[in-house]
Amino acid sequence: MSHTVTLLSGDGIGPEITAAVKKIIAASGIQITWEEHLAGKLAVEKFGDPLPQTVLDSILKNKVALKGPLTTEVGKGFKSVNVQLRKTLNLYANLRPVKSIPGTRARYTNVDIVVVRENTESLYAGIENEIAPGVIQASKVITREASTRIAKFAFEYARSHKRKKVSAIHKANIMKLADGLFLKCCQEIAKDYPEIEYNEVIVDNCCMQLVMNPLQFDVMVLENLYGDIVSDLCAGLVGGLGVVPGANIGTEASVFEAVHGSAPDIAGKGVANPTAMLLSAVMMLEHLGENKAAERIMNAVYRVLGEGKVLTPDLRGEATTMQYADEIVRFIEL
Ligand code: NAI
């Protein structure tokens, strides 16, 4: 079966890793028509708008997009297109499976955690005001609706993937109302899933526990800011940002993207690791029902990483992005 997918290559290392991913997907035998669009700073240069309506229309029409990283300037410039996309398309669940892969620079070899991050509110609601000279107030928005929806998503994911435990991560000892509401919603939903163990961990302790003993975690559900930070911490347990995939799931559309950013320090050098974007594309293939192709690609990735002969520099190798991609293609074709 053929599919039409919106493709945002992004900027920085985005175009390099996207080219590698397209090549590997094509080798897996899946027919995908890519509808390519610009977003972020490249779209500002061309259309004067970081997120043109044509991009949103394309994603809503195709219902699925694969996205490379987009640079967001710190403390100035246009609002993050990543955040805008998630909010505009109501991509409320950010799903980040964090699994040890053989051959990576992993600190642990048997981590298997799924981070479910609320994607639309908390401090990312973008409500910042200068309430007096030298005093900035940023508002954290937590709603019953969004918290219940993300808790339900986490438990449904746990049930359908035969997971045993969901941990809600919070700071309700300090933010008694905001995080208190988030926890209350998780507790209410947990009652509907008696077969799944439920516990609550304060976010600072959670970070320490993750580093000391990550195996105690299974599925984690977090509001937006904690989810952002904790999922990067989890990535560090299994080999870094270059190997961790992600998906933003909504009711109208889903956008698949790696966790990492545009890596300006290595952009244009042809050495970026495309694995994270590739694994995001594998999640996309599963979402499209192409499980066989997804499995073939995964097997090839595991073989190449496991052999450890052709690796990008972030994994202590010397291969370029395309040499690594070609090696994966070689194993797919075997
Ligand atoms: P980053 O993820 O771009 O880079 C952090 C470090 O990881 C760098 O040393 C980089 O070289 C390395 N790295 C990241 N991806 C890699 C890959 N695939 N292969 C090898 N090494 C890799 O994070 P940073 O520097 O904080 O952000 C850079 C820009 O990216 C910022 O403008 C930020 O806003 C944006 N960003 C965009 C995201 C998105 O589009 N979803 C997510 C995170 C950041």
Image (cartoon, helix red, strand yellow):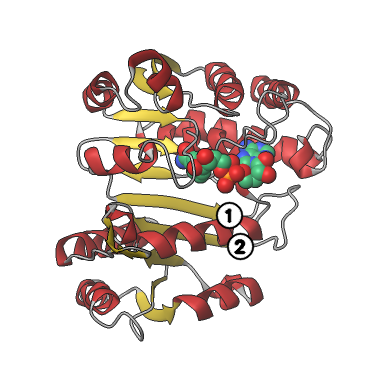
Q: Residue reaching furthest left?
A: 145
User: Can you say whether 19 is above or below 73 in the image?
Assistant: above
Disc number for residue 111: 2
x and y, in percent, of residue 133 in the image: 33, 63
Distance (Cα) linking label 2 and label 1:
5 Å
Per the image, label 1 sits on a secondary structure element best described as strand
Residue lying at 32% horizontally and 23% vertically, measured from the top left: 49
User: Can you say whether 150 is above or below 94 in the image?
Assistant: below
Q: Nearer the viewer, residue 191 or 323?
A: 323
x and y, in percent, of residue 64 in the image: 32, 29
Mark 1 C-beta closer than 8 Å to ligand 1: no
Q: Residue reaching furthest bottom?
A: 173
Residue lying at 36% horizontally and 62% vertically, measured from the top left: 158
Per the image, label 2 sits on a secondary structure element best described as loop
x and y, in percent, of residue 83 in the image: 34, 44
Residue lying at 31% horizontally and 79% vertically, measured from the top left: 175
Residue 272: quadrant of the picture: top right
**Can the viewer see residue 254?**
yes
Residue lying at 26% horizontally and 44% vertically, measured from the top left: 87
Residue 208: quadrant of the picture: bottom right
Q: Ligand 1 falls in which quarter?
A: top right
Q: Contact (CB < 8 A) between labels 2 and 1?
A: yes
Q: Residue reaching furthest front?
A: 133
User: Can you say whether 209 is above or below 69 in the image?
Assistant: below
Q: Nearer the viewer, residue 61 or 120?
A: 120
User: Can you say whether 322 is above or below 164 in the image?
Assistant: above
- Please name the amino acid that badge 2 sits on: Val
x and y, in percent, of residue 283 in the image: 45, 39
- Quadrant (top left/top right/bottom left/bottom right) for the C terminus: top right
Query: Residue tagged by mark 1?
Result: 99
- Quadrant (top left/top right/bottom left/bottom right) for the N terminus: top left
Residue 138: quadrant of the picture: bottom left
